[in-house]
Image (cartoon, rainbow, N blue to C red):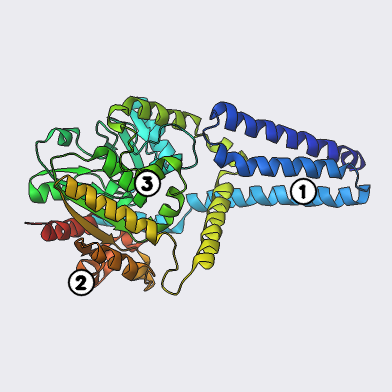
Amino acid sequence: MKYFKNFFPILCLSISLLLLSYIFYKSEISWQGSRRNFYIIYYIFSFLLIFFSIIIFYLSKKINEYLIILSVSLILSLYFFEGYSLIKDIYNPSINIKKKIYEKQTGKKYDTRSKLQVYKELKKIDSNVTLKVSPKNYLQNNHILFPLSSISNSKTIYNNENGYYFIYESDRYGFNNPDKEWDSNELKYMLIGDSFTHGANVNRPNDMASVLRTLSDKSTLNLGYSGNGPLIQYATLREYLNPNVKKIIWIYFEGNDLIDLNDEINNKTLISYLNDLTFSQNLKVRQNEINSLVNDVLNKTNLNKYTRFIKLYKTRQMMSNLLKVKSLTKKSVKNNTKNNPLLPLTQFKRIIKQAKNLSKKNNSQFYFVYLPKYQRYKNGYEDPNYNLVKKIIRELDIPFIDIHSEVFQKEKNPLKLFPFEMKGHYNVEGYKKIAEIIYKYTQG
């Protein structure tokens, strides 16, 4: 212990310098500075650690002894928590409940594999397999290119909420469509939205876009993608809108769309779509660049579970989410009014107005669909922005399709429209009922 106390200051300084070197390598060499904003907090932490390590040289041996105990305890606690998080995921009680229900109802085995297991197994059979990479992954990047979709013409693995994995063949632009839809002379519907529009977590033909294709017997394009907020959705509309689209369906999810918008308005590329009506990245002719960039992200994402454990992946993810919530809470308090507990309603209104104007210019009818979240029916939660969003849409004279009142309130048990009546996206029945309402209110 005596030797270790003497060695402790040198050890701390060495680890600090190694950490700074690693962060520099990841930020400036591996990512070529494109994710510098993401690594800022790690730079700050490493510099503070170096400063702390230098101070240790001038502290008494007794204080150093306390610091050793404190440091070892902290490190062990972090890894115990990481281990607990991993075990909790593996032995999640809700999975056992889902397994019993799924196997009883379908006679099939619930797929308990992790997404990475599925990816590695399919990759052995078909090299043209990829994982879903959402546009929001580029919010902190400084890439010249900001993709609004993912890899094209590839078998894309999403998640498992219904007992099986949501896997689809992406189209020529990386969206969840049969590729032939882009060749249609007339498009009945174009859907804009987030993961619910994307199709999470049901396979074709059970997502909203597929059901609308069946109901209308017309071509339908789905431009939804997981994690998209209103500004990314608007940018997607700007980049991929076809002149032969009859009806544009903007699908809003009350659970996180305004929260996502808080992040999106701070991205220079995305805000250009809102501030400059002539701005474009010309993404339709840059799909090879998008494929290359997404592949680069996947290659740099460590898929090894042991490395993820050493790097405290789950612990850091949880801390990041907590900091995000805390930041949003501070903003809400600072900018709070009695009727405006969440922030970016002004920007939201601008986005929807511009989307409507773009639709009108394209001779397309524009509809706004409001999707409710699980907590409404599980806990009786009322979203504080429900009436505010509704008011904005009506002020803009846009047809408002309220899925809360048109679908869920009419169910004796609204929870049955969610996977196993648990928190998540909608199930096959839920998507079907929503698509039927959209079809009903968009005729004529």
Q: Disc 3 vs disc 1: Cβ atoms closer than 8 Å?
A: no
- Relative to 290, does residue 41 appear above or below in the rendering? below
Classify residue 47 as left or right of residue 382.
right
Which residue carries the number 2 mark? 410
Classify residue 11 as left or right of residue 377.
right
Q: Which amino acid does label 3 sit on?
A: Asn
Q: What residue type is labelled 2?
A: Lys
Q: Nearer the viewer, residue 114 or 404?
A: 404
Which residue carries the number 1 mark? 71
Q: Which amino acid does label 1 sit on?
A: Ser
- The quadrant holding residue 367 is bottom left
- The quadrant holding residue 122 is top left
Residue 417 x, y percent position in the rendering = 26, 62
Of labels 2 and 1, earlier in sequence is 1
Regarding residue 107, the answer to whether it shows in the image is: no
Measure how far apart labels 3 and 2 are at the Cα level: 41 Å
Residue 384 x, y percent position in the rendering = 39, 70
- Relative to 321, does residue 171 appear above or below in the rendering? above
User: Going 72% across and 41% down the picture, which residue do you hit?
Assistant: 47
User: Going 18% across and 55% down the picture, which residue do you hit?
Assistant: 435
Of labels 3 and 2, earlier in sequence is 3
Of labels 3 and 1, earlier in sequence is 1
Q: Say which of marks 3 and 2 sits in front.
A: 3
Which SS class for mark 3? Answer: helix
Which residue carries the number 3 mark? 275
Label 2, residues with CA under 10 Å away: few <14, some 14-19, many ≥20: few
Residue 365 x, y percent position in the rendering = 15, 52
